[in-house]
Image (cartoon, rainbow, N blue to C red):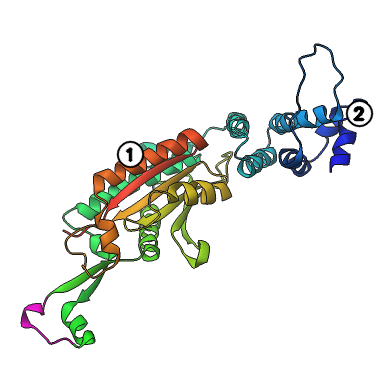
């Protein structure tokens, strides 16, 4: 690779030779430069001879600009790959943002009239053309879900395991007590089950109510590391008549229980650095199930950790972490604390 770059860097070769390379080849060259080339120590001399090393180092900024100039979906993916692989290169995310904006402006077309008519007939209907807009629609539903959970016909029970106390006593060989006849013990669903319940509710909402009128919304629980399933992938796939620049937009929802040991670090280490990077996405939701209540069985080992975290302080800390991620990584994450405690 070094010999090839030295040839490319020769002054008697035109710069257009680099422009003819494919996106994947440009990625390989830029990655090699970032990983191997040493920054040049430029002298203060007014006139000096540029070496091959000087020209090779200059390519680390020239090549991303070539990708920017192509303004294509393929070059955008190439820039995103470089930004993900080399987070220390702070200019790359800015170039990604620029190309995305240019593509949107170049590819924008008016929505078909049928969508306009449908959206004016229902105040809950939404048109979705980007992951940021899909995130807003999901947020609106989670707020609606919170009202349903705390409403008169509470659905919070679906997030809990329920065990009749007489049955537990029988299993443990303890004597039957008449006063325990109608008593129950409650423990929260584990994170996988909680994630599945939320995914099912989101899918049902979009299917039954047709909130997003120009895309099909598909919800799935994704297998994570070590067989865990704590994230939800929500895809909004464009209608065949919708000439949107992005035929599919995706939002990832990372799900945690209030007892999780990594509650205040996983927003960055899992959602921002892992899931969103894999999907080349800049928007996500960090959903935390808040279960703290007196009905929670005291013998459940998760309760002690959860009891140290009250609602307001936890929400404030998660908002602070999301703000830091926004400033440092230019990734928009909305923390949602879903109160599913029993009344």
**Residue 116: in sight, yes or no?**
no
Q: Quadrant of the C terminus?
A: bottom left
User: Where does the N terminus fall, quadrant-wise?
Assistant: top right
Task: Find disc 1 in the rendering and name its residue.
Answer: 123
Q: Residue furthest top?
A: 46
**How far across and down, in percent of the image, does residue 267 sit?**
43, 48
- Which residue is farthest right? 12
For residue 102, side relative to residue 315 (left or right)? right
Does residue 54 sit above or below 313 in this rendering?
Answer: above
At x 49% / y 39%, what residue is drawn? Answer: 331
The percent coordinates of residue 216 (x first, y second) are 48, 51
Query: Is 320 situated left or right of 281 in this image?
Result: left
The residue at the far left in this view is 179
Of residue 255 and residue 171, the one placed in the foreground of this image is 171
Q: Report helix, strand or loop for mark 2.
A: loop
In magenta segment, residue 222: no
SS for dot 1: loop
Q: Which mark is residue 199?
A: none
Q: Is residue 264 above or below residue 15?
A: below
Per the rendered image, the range of residues in magenta is 174-182
- Residue 178 lies in magenta, yes or no? yes
Q: Quickly name the residue at label 2.
A: 13
| Residue lying at 36% horizontally and 54% vertically, measured from the top left | 205
The quadrant in which residue 103 appears is top right
Residue at point 58%, 29% (across, down): 105
Q: Nearer the viewer, residue 241 or 262?
A: 262
Whether residue 237 sits left or right of residue 3 in the image: it is left
């Amino acid at each position: 690779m070094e010999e090839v770059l030295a040839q490319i860097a020769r002054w008697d070769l035109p710069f257009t030779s680099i422009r003819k390379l494919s996106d994947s080849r440009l990625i390989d060259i830029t990655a090699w430069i970032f990983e191997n080339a040493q920054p040049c120590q430029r002298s203060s001399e007014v006139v000096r001879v540029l070496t091959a090393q000087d020209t090779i180092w200059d390519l680390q900024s020239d090549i991303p600009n070539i990708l920017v100039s192509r303004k294509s979906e393929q070059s955008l993916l190439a820039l995103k790959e470089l930004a993900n692989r080399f987070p220390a290169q702070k200019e790359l995310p800015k170039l990604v943002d620029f190309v995305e904006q240019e593509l949107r402006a170049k590819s924008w077309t008016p929505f078909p009239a049928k969508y306009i008519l449908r959206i004016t007939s229902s105040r809950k209907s939404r048109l979705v053309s980007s992951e940021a807009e899909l995130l807003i629609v999901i947020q609106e539903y989670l707020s609606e879900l919170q009202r349903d959970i705390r409403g008169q016909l509470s659905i919070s029970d679906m997030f809990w395991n329920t065990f009749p106390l007489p049955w537990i006593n029988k299993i443990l060989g303890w004597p039957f007590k008449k006063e325990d006849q109608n008593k129950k013990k409650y423990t929260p669903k584990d994170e996988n089950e909680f994630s599945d319940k939320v995914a099912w509710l989101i899918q049902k909402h979009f299917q039954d109510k047709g909130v997003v009128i120009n895309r099909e919304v598909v919800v799935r629980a994704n297998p994570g590391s070590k067989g865990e399933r704590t994230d939800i992938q929500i895809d909004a796939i464009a209608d065949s008549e919708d000439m949107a620049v992005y035929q599919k937009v995706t939002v990832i929802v990372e799900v945690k229980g209030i007892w999780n040991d990594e509650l205040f670090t996983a927003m960055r280490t899992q959602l921002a650095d892992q899931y969103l990077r894999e999907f080349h996405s800049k928007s996500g939701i960090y959903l935390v199930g808040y279960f703290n209540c007196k009905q929670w069985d005291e013998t459940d080992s998760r309760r002690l950790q959860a009891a140290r975290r009250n609602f307001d302080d936890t929400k404030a800390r998660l908002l602070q972490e999301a703000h830091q991620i926004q400033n440092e990584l230019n990734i928009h994450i909305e923390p949602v604390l879903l109160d599913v405690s029993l009344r």
